[in-house]
Amino acid sequence: MKFEFSDEEELLRRQVRQLAREKLAPLVVGDEDVESPEIVCQVQTAMAEQGLFALFVPEEYGGQGVKSVCLCIVREELSKVSSIADELFAEVGLGVYGVNVVGHRGGKTTGSPFGHC
């Protein structure tokens, strides 16, 4: 079986790799065991500005739609540079999942606090 990323998936991979190397790596230089709130906030803001959290939101609510392959691509590229970024991305996804599954329509369309520290 031959597996290749679609053009959209390959573009996402390149964009996340660039974000991870150019913006996130300098923030998390050194010991990642020390997760200061300032660094976490900067990492979260950089990922939000890139639009990564929209991958967790269905298209009908203004997101990019939830696609497992895209989520895996993002996590793989983030984890190459920063466990903090990868964990934060996964945690946001878990939080948004609950809203997507059991949230009421009004709450889903009022906007997202992600990216604001």
Image (cartoon, rainbow, N blue to C red):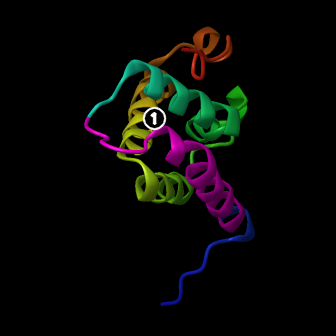
- The magenta stretch spans which residues? 10-33
Looking at the picture, which amino acid does disc 1 mark? Gly
Q: Position of residue 81 (x, y in %)?
A: 45, 54
**Which residue matches tag 1?**
93
Relative image position of residue 7 (x, y in whole percent): 74, 69
Q: Quadrant of residue 64?
A: top right
Find residue 39 and report its horizontal and vertical position in percent.
45, 28
* Residue 106 horizontal/vertical position (percent): 63, 9
Q: On the picture, is 115 further left or further right than 90?
A: right
The quarter of the picture where the C terminus appears is top right
Dot 1, crowdedness within 10 Å: few (<14), some or many (≥20)? some
Q: Residue at x 41, y 54 (%)?
A: 79
Residue in view at x 60 percent, y 22 percent: 115
- In the image, is residue 89 part of the stretch drawn in magenta? no
Q: Is residue 31 magenta?
A: yes
Query: Which SS does the magenta portion mostly show?
Result: helix
- In the image, residue 60 sits, relative to residue 24, either above or below, namely above
| Residue pictured at 57% horizontal, 56% vertical | 70
Along the viewing direction, whichever of 27 and 51 lies nearer the viewer: 27
Q: Is residue 69 above or below residue 48?
A: below
Judge left or right: residue 87 versus residue 26: left
Q: Residue 107 falls in which quadrant of the image?
A: top right
- Quarter assignment of residue 104: top right
Which residue is depicted at the point 46% across and 20% down? Answer: 38
- Mark 1 lies on a secondary structure that is helix
Q: Nearer the viewer, residue 116 or 20?
A: 20
Farthest-out residue, bottom: 1
**Relative to 46, does residue 36 appear above or below in the rendering?**
above
